[in-house]
Image (cartoon, grey):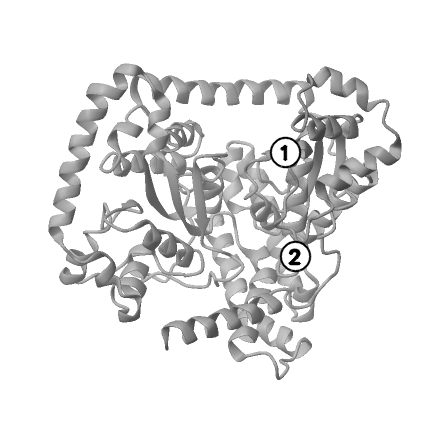
Amino acid sequence: MNENFSSEEKEIISSFVSSLDKPVFVLKNLPEVVMGALFSRYSRSPKPLRQLLLDEFISDEKMGFKEIVGFQTEKGIEQAIAIKKAEEFYDRVLLGFGDDSVAELGGAHLAVEDVSNIGVKLIQDARIGISPLEKSTRYIYFDKKDENGNYFYLREKKIMQSNFADDYTELCNSLFEVYSKSIEPMKKFIEENNPKTEEVSDRAYNSTVKAKACDVLRVFLPASTLTNTGLYGNGRAFEYMISRLSSYPLTETKEIAKTMHLELSSYIPSFVKRAFGEYGNPTIEFLAETRKKTKKLSKEFLGKEKINSSNEVELIDFDENAEEKVLSAILYSNLHLPLHQIKEKIKELTEEQKKQLINSYVSLRKNRRHKPGRAFENTDYTFDIIGNYGVFRDLHRHRLLTQERQLLSTHHGFVSPVELNAIGINEDYVSLMNQAKELFEKIEEKNPWSAQYLVTFGYKIRWYFKLNLRQAFHLTELRSTMQGHPDYRRVAQKISSEIKRVHPNLTEHLKFVDMKEYNLERLEAEKQQDKKIKEMQDKYGK
């Protein structure tokens, strides 16, 4: 998404970004609060970050940007000198002690733009050390074209250099065309079936209708759809991310990794210097070769097995001794006894005493933000989940869980939202899904990783969650709130029901899971937003 800046604009923006033309760049010379606000706005805006920074922060007088940061070019020069001095200090002193954890004390805000939905999920696989925000398919329409009339999706190099290039672009163009032409009919259908009431503002209603239309129509989007993500992370996490991205058999991630390294080296050079070279290259080789070997043996051992049908959410494994472990942990922090002694004594407690202890630990919860203590981390659950790619993307944000996905494919079928039939586009949708399946199977034979790019959000993917009870409280209560997408709400509800089935005593106070269904999921959230807008206007003026 190219920006066309004037010379004056370039001079202004250059003080705050490491590059004016690269899709990967570092934010600099900005207070933390400004960078946080910028990334937050980024996730809800179709604009590239540099354009957003100029239009809505620098140029908007209400933001008070000049007063916050100023436009002193000297500041950029001073920072460059400071970076060089810091690198010298790091090289002379800290590396001598071999303390890798020092790299966790320096960080950067990094923007990654024009990345596919395959690439962005691989970037966001980082479990800790990286905080990402991404352009949302739930609040932004992906119907724009560039100056040459092209939709924004990745022309993946290996596909474009193959005999499937024309079929690939034809399919992706068709998907975007139907998506784009369906926006207004879908909005009209939603409005007719959910008319606006007097107490709802135009802003809240229109935003809610837009979100609902996005929710339904995103099944058309191919995984090649380009998006933006903002990352805040420490140097150690970025260093490993660069090595990890370099290990995938995708041209896209390898190129992103190189540009990341180049840009971060201009800002926190000492912390990412080992992403390649003596330490990084062996790591890249280890990750890549391990992936190849396990893939080869997996195909050899079970590659000819037919895929059995399964439920959307299946509880595969849980702890038979969950109560004993949780109760032991509750008691442990309140006593001075060894853990083995506590476990023995728990067997002597009555069922009523055990319930009393559990209740004392969680019964005072007043809302979902009152999280159970760490004692609930002592029991685990493994779920096998099959859902459309859009659902996976939403739940992928719970990175602290142990979760692993299979490659995106067309092997598990696709979902068909009922609203598509209501506005007369279901036949087009099914036809395009079948075309995607046919082309995918041809490309998959030679390159299963690249074949993922043409699979749509409507196709199903299989992944598993391994999570402890404390994480389950957080996930199911958060992802079942009414403003959530109905597909991932359903997954959260089923996870909650399965855990309650096997461990009723431990989940008696898992009480903020919303099991209801709604027509306009975002409406209440938008009404609350209206209140916040009014409070802001009253506080700062219009």
Residue 151 in view (yes/no): no
Q: Is residue 106 left or right of residue 526?
A: left
- State the residue at coordinates (30%, 33%): 261
Residue 439 in view (yes/no): yes
On the image, the x and y values in percent for residue 438 come to 60, 45
Q: Is residue 273 left or right of residue 41?
A: left
Quadrant where the C terminus is found in the figure? bottom left
Q: Dot 1 lies on which element? A: helix
Query: In the image, which disc is placed on residue 469?
Result: none
Circle 1: is it few (<14), some (14-19), or many (20+) Cα within 10 Å?
some
Q: Dot 2 lies on which element? A: loop
What type is the residue that disc 1 sits on? Arg
Q: Which residue is mark 2?
A: 481
Q: Earlier in the sequence, mark 1 or mark 2?
A: 1
What type is the residue that disc 2 sits on? Thr
Circle 2: is it few (<14), some (14-19), or many (20+) Cα within 10 Å?
many
The count of marks equals 2
Q: Nearer the viewer, mark 1 or mark 2?
A: 1
The quarter of the picture where residue 214 lies is bottom right
On the image, the x and y values in percent for residue 263 come to 26, 39
Q: Is residue 66 above or below residue 133?
A: below
- State the residue at coordinates (70%, 65%): 518
- State the residue at coordinates (68%, 53%): 366
Q: Is residue 197 above or below residue 55?
A: below
On the image, the x and y values in percent for residue 95 come to 27, 19
Q: Which residue is mark 1?
A: 374
Quadrant where the N terminus is found in the figure? bottom left
- State the residue at coordinates (76%, 36%): 315
How far apart in space, not on screen, are marks 1 and 2 (Cα)?
24 Å
The quarter of the picture where residue 204 lies is bottom right
Contact between labelled residues 2 and 1, with CB atoms less than 8 Å apart: no
